[in-house]
Image (cartoon, grey):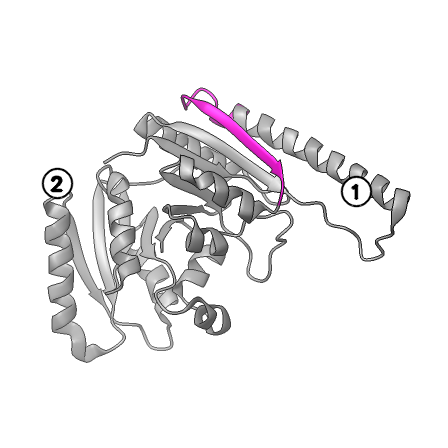
Amino acid sequence: MTFATVMVSLALSQPNEARLQVAGDLAARFEAGVIGVAAAEFTPPLYFTTGEQAQDLIEQGEAALQTRLGELEQHFRSVVGGRAAPLSWRAALEFPVRSVLAQARAADILVTGSIPPGVSDAFAVASPKDLVMQAGRPLLVVPDNATWLDLSTVLVAWKETPEARRALVDALPLLAKATDVVVTEILENTSEYDACEARLDDVVAWLGRHQIVASARVEQPGQGRNVAAKLDAVAADVSAGLVVAGAYGHSRFRELVLGGVTEHLVTRTERCVLLSH
């Protein structure tokens, strides 16, 4: 149960310090190597022209992007260097999501940042919403206020879905280093309380066979609270530094339109979140 290689995705137009600090923390804890990745695609202006003038404009834009990518590499090496071996950097003039997904094969876990609510710039940012669906690796989403990965208490958000089971397996290396692990399920139907207790007992017993001591906690949404808000409240109550959850247990379209736990975790979380799909 370990991470041998950590990959951290940097953004051109968003803060990167928090995700770099957490990537370096992971590298130190697991004696892992770190790969930094960043990419961007030149965005042609709305008044885009043609011919020689257009080529000049593209070359100037791409040169500016190369300069910015060089600055990101220096930042990456200054923050993570000394805490990881080996250390490597990969950058490209390409759509960020496409570039990061192509590189994810080289890592055990992918670290990225949270994003503000709304539509992000696909030319400059690899959105965690896209990465978690396609990377085939656990995604650690880091809020901008994080300075390290707090594993004193880890909250596992359980739901009877394949995504939750996968997230639990992916999180085993982190859970093994946690001081306290709490597995919770937020009921959507109060008549399932006994069945929920039985499910959580199975999960806690399974973790125990991996030498991870955990406790179970059945929760019901408070009056006027949705599941995401209740999960936040539970995380705050147990002082969780990390939340582990399956991503998009319902269809992604439904979550994007109606809102959901995954959408909340990648846009409004105050703590690190490990997601798997």
Q: Is residue 198 visible?
A: yes
Identity, as a three-letter code, of the amino acid under mark 2: Gln
Dot 1: element:
helix
Asked if 94 appears above or below 68 in the picture, the reply is: below
Which residue is drawn at the image coordinates 60% and 32% (left, top)?
72
Residue 93 among those drawn in magenta: yes
Instruction: Give the magenta range.
Output: 78-94
Looking at the picture, how far across and down is residue 46, in whole percent?
81, 57
Looking at the picture, how far across and down is residue 105, in whole percent?
41, 39
Quadrant of the image containing the N terminus: top left
Residue topped by disc 1: 58
Which of 73/270 is in front? 73
Residue topped by disc 2: 211
Asked if 246 appears above or below 101 in the picture, the reply is: below
Quadrant of the image containing the C terminus: bottom left
Dot 2: element:
loop
Which residue is drawn at the image coordinates 58% and 29% (left, top)?
73
Residue density around tag 2, few if under 14, some if 14–19, many if 20 or more, within 10 Å: few
- What is the spatial separation of the Cα atoms under label 2 and label 1, in whole angstroms? 56 Å
Which residue is drawn at the image coordinates 45% and 45% (left, top)?
142
